[in-house]
Image (cartoon, rainbow, N blue to C red):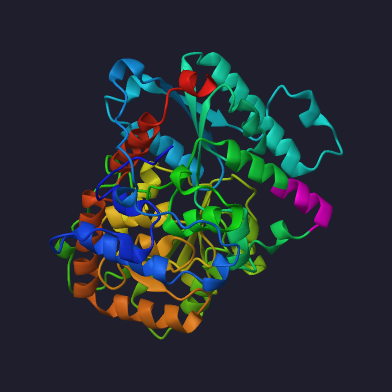
Amino acid sequence: MAGLVRRYPAGAHNIAPPNSFPPLAGPGTASRVHARLSKVLTALPSDRTRRRAPVPRHPEARQGPMISLRSASERDKVAFLFHLGHGHYTQFLNFQECMPENYQPRAAWVALHGEGSGDPLARIPLLPGSRRYARHQMWHARRGLAENPGCSTIFCAAEITALADLTPSYRCFLYTDLTPSLKRELAPWYDHQLRGSPIIRAIKESRRRRLYRSCHGIFTMSAWAARGFACDYGVPEEKLHVVLPGANLNLWKYTDRSVRPTRGPAPVRILMVGGQFRLKGGELLLRWAEETRLRNWEMDIVTWPSELPEWAGAALAHPRAGERVSGDLAPRLPGVRIHCGMQANTPELMNLYERADIFCLPTQADGSSIASLEAMASGLPVLVGAAGGIPELIEDGRTGCLLERGCFEDLACKLDRFIMDRDLRITMGRRARASCEDYFNVTRQIREIMQVIDAYPAAAALAA
């Protein structure tokens, strides 16, 4: 079927060659996002086109009549299935809280736990951990669908290849921030997932292709991720829908930092929030803390304990996974505090954002960054690694600052500048909040998703 014809802001995020976007008037956020996406698409590596997969065109350039949205009586319930690891849990909470009122009666929520299922095969001792996890998730998916019999559409924020078995009975839409093939571009951080037996890898690739072919649509969080589906897996253009993520503005409120005292001993507070400490650039920040000559600063790092350096783990008495612990790294780095076990969207986490002056996440491998969007919504200037689809969220130098992946010198130079320049921090933080109010918010994201889903034929028509 032809893709949904939409105008900006939704239309600008369908995949398209840079020159095919329609012109936009005015200097607002919409125009800037449009221009930034065009640059992203132009800068994509040329060797990714070697498979000659079709490059999707802008919807308005397609021939044929525009598809009308179905009437309210024809719209069915949608089961939102969310994997609970990494940033998906935050989005699971945000989608539920920010679902527009007119869509709320149609939404059912299913948490895909990676344990605790009734699947007997998931308890086989020699079953690989990834397969056990997937079987648990699929069991919870089937149970959730059985408990919500009115659902005929699945929106799945987890790549469960067995989901392909449900496509004859449901309209299935996948939601993701990157493809397995794109993990090669984020080397070496995902190399452990790309190694192994060639036969096993081939089987996994075959199952993924079957899943992608059977889905009725695929939502990606960036044009970068959508290009991976098009170039590496040959997913047709009409199935790809780029819907950039957003922050939950109901929770993340703007803090006016211009009213804080400009003189006195108050330090500049730096915040990093990222579970996988090494992948998110935590070691780079600790190195900066040890080597910088600046003194009037403090740093809070919210992370998991498993990847902390040995000496840092010892300073916190080696916390267990999930254990709630906060403490500084004295005597080596007394100005750095580590927080482990802090949950998403909690008052204590939001308090750290409110008290901070700078958000710094020098991530080295990411598809997108919800934590950065939450910082922007809080009015914080954001310094974030230019990995994956993150450059599509940030207007470099205006709503945030992009860091070269893995480059300590770039991080040190830019972080020092932001610590010393209060006016820059305040101005950029205000622009960041404005960009979230204008576009990067969850409510807008959900509306775009639901508009695309409602443009597809009903499940009954597909079955026929």
Residue 99, quarter of picture: top left
Which segment did they paint magenta? 196-205
Please state the horizontal and vertical placement of residue 301, each as a whole percent of the image: 47, 61
Q: Main secondary structure of the magenta part?
A: helix
**Res 444 seen here:** yes
Point out residue 400 in the picture as x, y percentages from the top left corner: 31, 67
Left or right, 433 with reference to 189:
left
Q: In this orientation, which residue lies closer to the viewer: 104 or 337?
A: 104
**What residue lies at 41% left-to-right and 86% top-to-bottom?**
293
Q: Residue at x 65, y 28 (%)?
A: 165
Instruction: Say if 369 sits above or below 168 in the image.
Output: below
Q: Is residue 358 visible?
A: no
Q: Is residue 356 magenta?
A: no
In the rendered structure, the answer to whether residue 151 lies left or right of residue 144 reads left
Which quadrant, please, contains the N terminus?
A: top left
Q: Quadrant of residue 257?
A: bottom left
Please give the name of the residue rendered at 16% of the width and 64% of the height, measured from the top-left corner.
258
**Residue 38 x, y percent position in the rendering:** 34, 65
Residue visible at 81% across and 57% down in the picture: 198
